[in-house]
């Protein structure tokens, strides 16, 4: 397979030897089957494109297929998957790639040729992402592949999401069974100086650089010597040294600035302008009038423009156009690219030309491009570009229509963030367009409701609330009652998602009051269903039960299946048998089935979330994982991964893995999660912060404190409370631990009901208080002991109350009871003269439901109590267990405390040898055991309930840690080092 030709620049590449060596090394490793990605950062004009062009040229010479996609700045208009559609467009236009492309229908979908069945909400983003990944890996199977993405700082959110998938779960993953990886490298450039604090690319970059196959390369300004060499190489006649020195001084290490300043020296005036924009315009003004006209027109099109589109927009005969283009290319203002396209050599050149246009001239040219893009034979996905051009040309009716069309396209391809932007753009235009000129169908209120739904699907929950409030304000006195009710119950649902329960209940009450129950209607049913959810959250269970029963009967009569499902979920727990019980699970399964048949993904996700969390609350941690995985898969297929319930299920899955002791997996998955804002971070990062703190990273406390910034979010506050209270306890700061516990419980309390996490927070604070009391008692400070004992009694009362009043006001399950057992044991350290082994034995037994780390913390306290009771052998045995398991988890804080106890108590480790056992994590030990039995990666994954890819990662880690070249050698080394024991042979 050949390679896509790359643009050839005439200016030499000076310097960058280290960067080129590093990128070339990545390409060499990729050709050998080690897929890698490099994020190339640098200020505008520093040489990112030139460096990547040089590397791409070397790659082509070595037989690598090179595909390049560009991101484009269209202001507030998003064009989903633009760099990837550009790549697919190049592939589609080249018959050499026809066979590979034909095998992947994803190309037709992104290029706008796929069928539209009108069910955008259920279209599979996951299949689209996997299809792109499969296409790229198939290309890499034929020949080594280099994928170049330029100007990532302009990427739309859907392109960022696809890039996240490709790097975290797609093309960089090694195949199972130890086979070589994909012969693929991906280089993506972005302007570092464009990334302001809230730039949407920042959180993605933070995630990507933590991935094992991704690295970051920063192109810093060139040294003065390199700039001087570049300046001298650009002119056949040598420049005076004073001119070179002045250019080097002005360029400040920026290669583009230097090139422009050198070119400006050829101007008749001979002077050097004081600013870069002036330099660009001086070069522009040196062109003929026709060439200037062509560049002005091209600047309106954007960074790149096709030849045919430019010809039609500029209105010149072909010969005159070619002459003007040749002039612009020779003066290096434009470069010719693939498929007859032209692009400005640098974005700054285009920006300078565009800014120099007269207002009327700019509007006229935008209008020309809009009309051309709307003509026959144009791309079906050009609505976003047309909306941009129509708006800039002040043709507001057409801009409104194109914005709505762009929103439909974004919904069709599963891009809710872009849908929201386009609908909001339409709303901005609505009042400026005469009613007779508006598209038929929606009104401003229903359009605002659509925007609120897109915001909720994109995870912008507070934005969804704001938009629904706007819809409420837009209702007139004579508004249709059903629409008025729908606005109110939609607002109530959005308020519930941001934990504003009292306001949600008020609006759901209003919604239900606006619609009469007779005659029955689906609007009344949904108003009632929302009111039931709100009533439960504010503790109005009797109201919730009464309304739910009536609404369920009406929903059954009307055949509103998804509303029936929603009501069944709400009724779980209201009529006895909550989600932890078999009866509750049976009702939730019925609800899931009804919602699935109705095609209502959000209600189905609600059922799956309750099944998942019900498993956790009943102590069935492993049982939670299939429900959470099913829920996340359903969310991917519906394009709802950023909505509330999938975020909750993502947190649950990570939390279960943390609880079971799979800490390395927690950190790996946390690094792969999409995250933006405290709400998302609280769900995605919480368990990773728990691991970091247990492993001695006290910076986790500062990261937890950052979650509390911005609007109140319940999950972010809970995660922050747990980390900050525990961190204070580990520091021995009882004052801070109690302060965080109390302030957090107060903030998390809803409708007068304390959160179930109170028992855990109270116990963590009680730990710090007990440590303080023990120290004060040793110092003989009776007054201090009395004061802190009173505080401890209050904390114990909080823990007891919370354990008895869990979800639906029923006693908490195994987790809550385990934390209560630990609280009682901590209290025994305060109330008794000596630690009570029996209390700690009870706590150890209580955490046997599956919490590996908390059980070890209790075992350490048990060892301490046994030592105080002079039961040294038992204490040594407990210490040995803690030592072994803490090493496997990497729980450094716990290990340090154990070592301190062992020194103080003169405990010895009764376990013989086995010093190498601490090399591997707990999960790696499990994988090694199965590896020794000859299991494949797939079989290991099936036995340990992990994916084959994850098993492959663990196998690779094991080989690296024991310095083995193969699986067989790793097993042999493990036997020699005592990392695993031989399996006992069965008697004959």
Image (tube, rainbow, N blue to C red):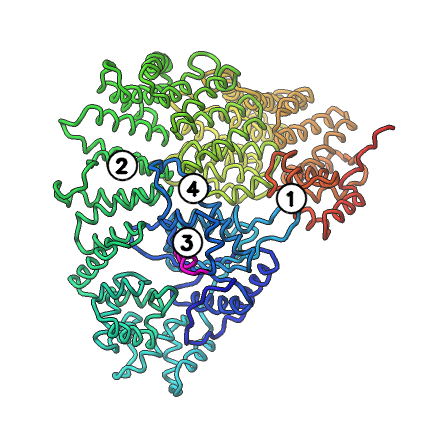
Q: Quadrant of residue 568?
A: top left
- How crowded pointer 3 is (Cα within 10 Å; few <14, some 14-19, many 20+) is rated as many
Q: Is residue 138 left or right of residue 639?
A: right
**Mark 3 and mark 4 in contact (Cβ < 8 Å)?**
no
Q: Is residue 200 visible?
A: yes
- How crowded pointer 4 is (Cα within 10 Å; few <14, some 14-19, many 20+) is rated as many
Q: Is residue 695 visible?
A: no
Q: Which residue is mark 4?
A: 125
Q: Nearer the viewer, residue 30 or 236?
A: 30
Residue 607 locus on image (x, y percent): 44, 25
Q: Which residue is mark 1?
A: 954
Q: Nearer the viewer, residue 39 or 59?
A: 59
**Disc number lying in front (4 or 2):** 4
At mark 1, the secondary structure is: helix
**Disc number lying in front (1 or 2):** 1
**Disc number lying in front (1 or 3):** 3
Q: Which mark is residue 467?
A: 2
Disc nearer the start of the sequence (1/3): 3
Q: Name the residue at 19% across, 33% down.
A: 474
Q: Which residue is mark 3?
A: 84
**Mark 3 and mark 1 in contact (Cβ < 8 Å)?**
no
Q: Name the residue at 53% across, 27% down.
A: 760
Q: Is residue 17 left or right of residue 421?
A: right
Numbered range of the magenta stretch = 85-95
Disc nearer the start of the sequence (1/2): 2
Q: Name the residue at 28% across, 36% down.
A: 450
- How crowded pointer 2 is (Cα within 10 Å; few <14, some 14-19, many 20+) is rated as many
Residue 8: within the magenta?
no
At mark 4, the secondary structure is: helix
At mark 3, the secondary structure is: helix
Disc nearer the start of the sequence (4/3): 3
Q: CA distance from mark 4 to mark 2?
A: 26 Å
């Amino acid at each position: 397979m050949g390679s896509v030709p790359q643009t050839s620049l005439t200016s030499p590449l000076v310097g960058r030897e280290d960067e080129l060596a590093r990128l070339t090394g990545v390409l060499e490793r990729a050709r050998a089957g080690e897929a890698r990605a490099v994020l190339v950062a640098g200020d505008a004009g520093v040489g990112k494109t030139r460096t990547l062009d040089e590397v791409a040229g070397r790659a082509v010479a070595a037989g690598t297929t090179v595909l390049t996609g560009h991101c484009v700045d269209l202001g507030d208009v998003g064009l989903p998957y633009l760099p990837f559609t550009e790549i697919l467009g190049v592939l589609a236009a080249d018959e050499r790639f026809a066979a590979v492309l034909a095998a992947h229908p994803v190309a037709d979908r992104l290029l706008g040729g796929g069928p539209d069945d009108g069910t955008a909400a259920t279209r599979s983003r996951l299949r689209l992402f996997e299809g792109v990944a499969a296409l790229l890996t198939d290309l890499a199977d034929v020949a080594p592949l280099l994928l170049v993405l330029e100007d990532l700082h302009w990427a739309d959110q859907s392109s960022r999401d696809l890039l996240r998938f490709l790097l975290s779960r797609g093309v960089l993953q090694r195949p199972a069974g130890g086979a070589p990886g994909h012969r693929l490298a991906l280089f993506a450039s972005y302007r570092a100086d464009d990334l302001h604090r809230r730039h949407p690319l920042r959180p993605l970059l933070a995630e990507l650089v933590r991935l094992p196959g991704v690295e970051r390369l920063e192109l810093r300004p060139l040294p003065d010597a390199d700039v001087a060499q570049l300046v001298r190489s650009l002119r056949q006649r040598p420049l005076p040294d004073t001119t070179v020195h002045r250019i080097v001084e002005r360029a400040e290490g920026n290669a583009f600035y230097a090139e422009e300043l050198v070119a400006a020296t050829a101007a008749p005036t001979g002077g050097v302008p004081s600013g870069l924009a002036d330099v660009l315009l001086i070069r522009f003004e040196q062109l003929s009038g026709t060439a200037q006209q062509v560049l002005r027109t091209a600047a309106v099109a954007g960074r790149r423009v096709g030849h045919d589109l430019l010809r039609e927009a500029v209105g010149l005969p072909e010969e005159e156009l070619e002459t003007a283009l040749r002039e612009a290319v020779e003066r290096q203002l434009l470069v010719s690219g693939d498929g007859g396209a032209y692009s400005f050599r640098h974005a700054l050149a285009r920006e300078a030309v565009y800014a120099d246009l007269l207002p009327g001239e700019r509007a006229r040219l935008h209008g020309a491009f809009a009309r051309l893009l709307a003509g026959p034979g144009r791309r079906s996905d050009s609505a976003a570009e047309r909306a941009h051009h129509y708006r800039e040309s002040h043709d507001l009716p057409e801009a409104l229509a194109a914005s709505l069309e762009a929103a439909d396209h974004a919904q069709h391809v599963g891009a809710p963030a872009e849908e929201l932007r386009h609908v909001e753009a339409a709303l901005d235009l609505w009042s400026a367009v005469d009613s007779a000129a508006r598209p038929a169908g929606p009104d401003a209120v229903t359009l605002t409701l659509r925007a609120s739904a897109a915001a909720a699907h994109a995870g912008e929950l507070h934005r969804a609330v704001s938009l629904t409030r706007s819809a409420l304000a837009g209702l007139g006195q004579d508004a249709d009652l059903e629409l008025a009710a729908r606005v109110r119950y939609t607002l109530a649902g959005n308020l519930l998602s941001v934990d504003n329960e009292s306001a949600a209940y008020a609006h759901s009450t209003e919604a239900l009051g606006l619609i009469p129950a007779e005659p029955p209607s689906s609007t009344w049913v949904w108003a009632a269903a929302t009111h039931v959810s709100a009533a439960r959250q504010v503790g109005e269970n009797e109201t919730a039960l009464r309304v739910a029963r009536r609404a369920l009967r009406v929903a059954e009569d009307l055949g509103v299946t998804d509303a029936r499902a929603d009501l069944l979920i709400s009724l779980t727990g209201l009529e006895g048998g909550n989600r932890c019980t078999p009866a509750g699970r049976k009702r939730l399964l019925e609800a899931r089935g009804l919602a699935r048949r109705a095609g209502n993904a959000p209600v189905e996700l609600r059922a799956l979330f309750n099944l998942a969390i019900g498993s956790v609350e009943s102590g069935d941690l492993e049982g939670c994982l299939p429900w959470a995985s099913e829920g996340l898969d359903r969310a991917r297929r519906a394009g709802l991964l950023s909505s509330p319930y999938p975020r909750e299920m993502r947190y649950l899955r990570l939390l279960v893995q943390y609880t079971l002791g799979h800490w390395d997996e927690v950190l790996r998955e946390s690094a792969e999660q999409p995250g933006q804002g405290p709400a998302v971070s609280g769900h995605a990062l919480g368990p990773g912060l728990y691991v970091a703190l247990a492993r001695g990273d006290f910076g986790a406390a500062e990261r937890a404190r950052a979650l509390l910034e911005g609007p109140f979010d319940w999950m972010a506050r809970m995660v922050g409370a747990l980390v900050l209270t525990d961190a204070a306890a580990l520091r021995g700061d009882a004052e801070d631990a109690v302060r965080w516990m109390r302030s957090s419980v107060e903030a998390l309390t809803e409708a007068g009901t304390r959160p179930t996490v109170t028992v855990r927070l109270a116990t963590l604070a009680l730990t710090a208080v007990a440590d303080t009391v023990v120290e004060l008692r040793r110092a003989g400070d009776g007054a201090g002991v009395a004061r802190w004992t009173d505080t401890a009694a209050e904390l114990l009362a909080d823990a007891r109350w919370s354990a008895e009043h869990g979800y639906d006001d029923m006693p908490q399950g195994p987790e809550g009871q385990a934390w209560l057992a630990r609280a009682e044991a901590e209290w025994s350290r305060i109330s008794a003269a000596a630690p009570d082994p029996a209390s700690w034995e009870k706590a150890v037994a209580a955490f046997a439901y599956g919490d590996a780390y908390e059980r070890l913390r209790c075992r350490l306290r048990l060892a301490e109590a046994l030592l105080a009771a002079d039961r040294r052998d038992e204490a040594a045995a407990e210490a040995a267990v803690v030592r072994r398991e803490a090493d496997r988890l990497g729980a450094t804080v716990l290990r340090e405390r154990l070592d301190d106890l062992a020194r103080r108590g003169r405990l010895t480790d009764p376990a013989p040898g086995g010093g190498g056992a601490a090399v591997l994590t707990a999960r790696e030990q499990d994988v090694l055991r199965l590896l020794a039995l000859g299991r494949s990666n797939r079989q290991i994954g099936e036995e340990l309930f992990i994916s084959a890819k994850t098993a492959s990662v663990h196998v690779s880690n094991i080989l690296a840690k024991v310095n083995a070249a193969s699986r067989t050698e790793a097993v042999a080394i493990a036997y020699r080092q005592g990392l695993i024991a031989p399996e006992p042979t069965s008697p004959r």
